[in-house]
Amino acid sequence: MKITVENAVARFPEYRFREPLSWTMDHDENWAVIGPNGAGKTLFTDLIQGSIALKEGHVRHEGRDGSEVSGKIRTLVFRDIYSMAGIRSMYYQQRWNSQDASESPYALSLLDGFSQETVDEYASLFGIGPLLHKRVISLSSGELRKFLITRALMTDPDILILDNPFIGLDEASRASLESMLAALNVRKGLQTILVLSQTKDIPEWVGKMLPILDRQVLPPLSRAEFFSDETLNRKLFPEAASSEPSPGLAARLADLKSRTRTEKAGDDYRFVLKMKDISVKYGGREIISGVDWEVRKGECWALLGENGSGKSTLLSLVCGDNPQAYANDITLFDRRRGTGESIWDIKKRIGYLSPDVHTYYLEDIPCLKVAASGFSDSIGLSGECSDEQYAIAMEWMKIFGASHLADRSFLRISYGEQRLVLLVRAFVKSPGLMILDEPLHGLDAGKKALAVKIIEEYCSDPEVSLIYVTHYRDEIPSCVSHSKVMHR
């Protein structure tokens, strides 16, 4: 397919770029659309698909014979996971409640419209065969992404638009996806547009780059031109260019901790976490078996493992979300689970961000209120916060470079911007234990660098402990000195 955009201007101002848009994607080309969070990348892909009404100009899709074609572009945007059948009726924590989880459909049932031959072919290409017989709600974040990408490919599109497809995938799955897309380009002529927020995710077989910044589409570049243009890369991701924390960061964090510290005098502990011979089962399927783990106060850990190895399940036991915690030998803050503490007693000492929190945070409220909901550990704002709590939340948004989002609806910002706001939410009460499960998902290269600096500074406090989950080892903060690897 060939896409031609000529002097396109959206009918409604909220969908417009700074200038009329002109761009061409020729037959057989593969493109990377790259830029920081909130730059307008998703707006661009919506426009080239013809899903935005135009005031001026036109968008044309042509086949090789020059005739106009339609319906052959497929888009996968992961922030819309919750609209998928089998997901939209679910709620946060349902995954950990076996009775409610049994109401979720099996992944295979979401492929009913495809022939068995097609299912077998694509399941083999991406190695998702074992996932098809699991319930959708039990899939890990990475497994769910692999399933959705494979399902999109089964529709046999001419052009596939993937929004940050590599985040959440382990190293082997990222390599497998790259190889699969390249192979389908050769075998079936599949053209791909990758919407990316960091340059390291651009595969070698993508030859065309389209930088977007502040709702302005910059001139297209070849791969070689883009990677050699250091000035452009600094312009796209300015925070990534500096290796030093912002001036005064340590003092600002110390002030916020003094205003929100949850520990009381004499409420000391030696161990944040002790687990002994942990086992989690759903039906006849064992998710975790024989896990032992101790985290001392002030220690910073990386929790690693492939997609589906049980990392998020293990953390759900710590955060009070999984009822199977009561059937296991778990001690938190030197207190054995099940000895009278409430879930909220546990949560008040933990700052938590995970893919599940993001997936089910569907509140159409201002981002400042989303950040402030961290004080009550709620999805949405449970009760009204005090003026001081809002002031603290706003200060954290400034530290993370997100203050411009304070009054905007959470559901109307980009996926990466949402993740940034939820990261702020984890910090607002200055907890003694930070549990960050893939916290940098969707953040652009600059915001990732900024977030890592903040995490490192925050965790330099000997009273703070960290459990950090990632599939990118180069994103592990320097404060991490211990690691635990989970296996299937």
Image: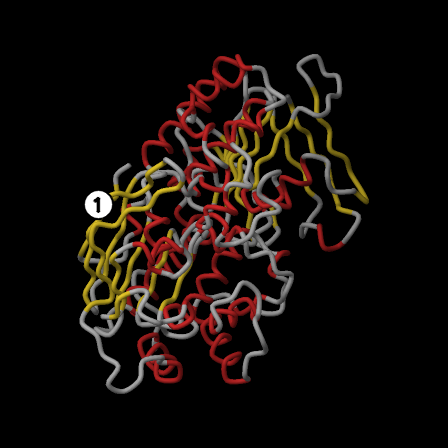
Q: Mark 1: which amino acid?
A: Gly
In the picture, measured across the screen, residue 25 lies left or right of residue 194, that is right
In the rendered image, the vertical position of residue 194 relative to residue 292, given as above or below: above
Q: Measuring 50% from the left and 84% from the top, which residue is drawn there?
A: 388
Q: Measuring 48% from the left and 41% from the top, which residue is drawn there?
A: 164
Counting from the top left corner in percent of width and height, residue 211 is at 52, 43
Counting from the top left corner in percent of width and height, residue 377 is at 47, 68
Q: SS class of the residue under badge 1?
A: strand
Residue ID for mark 1: 290
In the rendered image, the vertical position of residue 431 relative to residue 280, given as above or below: below
Q: Nearer the viewer, residue 56 or 381?
A: 381
Counting from the top left corner in percent of width and height, residue 442 is at 46, 49
Check the picture and name the quadrant holding the N terminus.
Answer: top right
In the picture, measured across the screen, residue 204 lies left or right of residue 93, that is left
Check the picture and name the quadrant holding the C terminus.
Answer: top left
In the picture, measured across the screen, residue 440 lies left or right of residue 26, that is left
Q: Nearer the viewer, residue 422 or 444?
A: 422
Counting from the top left corner in percent of width and height, residue 157 is at 61, 23
